[in-house]
Image (spheres, rainbow, N blue to C red):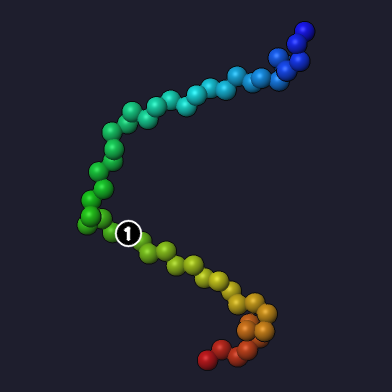
Amino acid sequence: MAKGLGSQKMVKKPKKDTAPPKVVSADAPRPSVVTQVPLRGKAAKLPKK
């Protein structure tokens, strides 16, 4: 038996996306994304103003 024949795996190919593109309206409200980063180290120990 040849080497490497058992190591090949059968992989399914993903199906082609045939869904129609979604319509995005410009007037749709979009939530703003706000990320809070906590202070670390010396800056965190300073009193807040």
Residue in the image at 26% along x and 55% along y:
28
Under tag 1, what secondary structure? loop
- The answer to whether 44 appears left or right of 3 in the picture is left
- The answer to whether 19 appears left or right of 46 in the picture is left
Residue in the image at 32% along x and 59% along y:
30
Q: Residue furthest front?
A: 2
Seen in the picture, residue 48 relative to 35 is either above or below; the reply is below
Where residue 27 sits: x, y (%)?
Answer: 22, 57
Figure disc tally: 1
Q: Amino acid at mark 1?
A: Arg
Where residue 26 sits: x, y (%)?
Answer: 23, 55
Residue in the image at 32% along x and 31% along y:
19
Residue in the image at 60% along x and 19% along y:
10
* Quadrant that contains the N terminus: top right
Where residue 2 sits: x, y (%)?
Answer: 75, 11
In front: 7, or 36? Answer: 7
Seen in the picture, residue 25 relative to 14 is either above or below; the reply is below
In front: 29, or 18? Answer: 18
Q: Residues within 10 Å of mark 1 (few under 14, many from 20)?
A: few
Seen in the picture, residue 5 relative to 34 is either above or below; the reply is above
- The answer to whether 12 appears left or right of 18 in the picture is right
Q: Residue furthest top?
A: 1
**Can you identify the residue that label 1 sits on?**
30
Q: Quadrant of residue 32?
A: bottom left
Where residue 9 sits: x, y (%)?
Answer: 64, 21
Q: Quadrant of residue 37?
A: bottom right
